[in-house]
Image: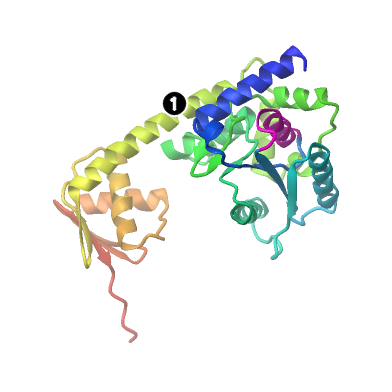
Amino acid sequence: MDNDAASLKNDFAEAFHRLIPAFESNGEKLGLAVSGGPDSLALLLLSFDVFPDRIAAATVDHGLRPAATTEAEFVASLCRERGIAHEILRPVVPIRGSIQSAARHARYGLLNDWMEANDIHWLATAHHADDQLETMIMRILRGSGIDGMSGIREKRANIVRPLLHFRKSTLIAYVASQGIEAVDDPSNRDQGFDRVRVREALNDLEGFDTGLASQSASALGSAREAIEWHVEQLAAEHIKTADSGCSLEKTAFPHEIQRRLLLKCLHICNVSLSPRGSQIDQTIIALERGETVTLGNILCRGGENWAFQTAPKRRNS
């Protein structure tokens, strides 16, 4: 192994153990989502070097491209050569609607079922620093708040992304150095996707270290966690629940705190309610004026305290 590959392997091991410190000694299994692109192949090869006996891989064939079957078989052959357990997962229901969103939903559903069936505790995906920068720019363009601007999370539930601070060019070079030609997915050049257009625009910029985007995302993530921690304390102190709903007994907080407390109250009444940011802002303005408004199926009464309950069903005339 040359010096660059050895250094990358050490950096990967450090990143992984930072995310799951107990993994080295707890005997749990790591699942890898591997598409055959250079990013996921780098994840596969590095994981095999660091945890050769504790990994399994899966490739999702969404059925959207004829070449996807061949690509999945390519990943399967690489795994067979190394003695890595591998499965090809295919959705039962065809992907429809918003392709990227529906494919993502199906992919994680299939991977979750695969993990449960094989007693796999963690799932690693190959998101990297360039993905992080693209995501943050897309969310800026969509007007996201601090939650969205904190970008892709390194660890969420049982999903980890140990490559999030690694640049794509580094991963491509590493896979090439192993004598492997990665899959070229033509959808990565489809201008119909927002991410592809952002990627193309970033390609025209020079002199920027894409890895620094992950530092910004981490800082924003820390800020988000601090706000969430504070909101939990305030919610425990000031949100009172009852059979009919709940109330927020203190409301004089900065807007971002109000917004999060309001969402907690709404979710107490209806956990599936997911209002848009503009609806939240308008509701706060109305409640501060002492007005009564309906958001979704929740009746919200303003004033010094805010009260929330399921709105009575309308009678048919």
- Image quadrant where one finds the N terminus: top right
Q: Residue at x 33, y 51 (%)?
A: 263
Residue 302 can be seen in this image: no
Q: What residue type is labelled 1?
A: Ala
The magenta region covers: 38-53
Residue 142 can be seen in this image: yes
Pinpoint residue 122: horizontal percent, then vertical percent: 57, 43
Residue 45 located within the stretch drawn in magenta: yes
Which residue is at the front of the view, 217 or 70?
A: 70
In the rendered view, does 163 fall on the left or right side of 42?
Answer: left
Count of numbered circles in the view: 1
In the rendered view, does 118 fall on the left or right side of 286?
Answer: right
- Furthest toward the bottom, the residue is 317
Q: Relative to 309, say whether 28 is above or below.
A: above
Residue 122 located within the stretch drawn in magenta: no
Which residue is at the front of the view, 295 or 34?
A: 34
In the rendered view, does 9 fall on the left or right side of 244?
Answer: right
Residue occupied by mark 1: 219
Which residue is at the front of the view, 187 or 117?
A: 117
In the rendered view, does 130 fall on the left or right side of 283?
Answer: right
- Image quadrant where one finds the C terminus: bottom left
Q: Which residue is drawn at 22% across and 67% down?
A: 244
- Furthest toward the left, the residue is 304
Pinpoint residue 18: horizontal percent, then vertical percent: 51, 27
Res 11 → quadrant: top right
Q: What element carries label 1?
A: helix
Q: Which residue is drawn at 66% across and 24% down?
A: 167
Pinpoint residue 194: horizontal percent, then vertical percent: 64, 42
Q: Which residue is drawn at 37% across and 35% down?
A: 225
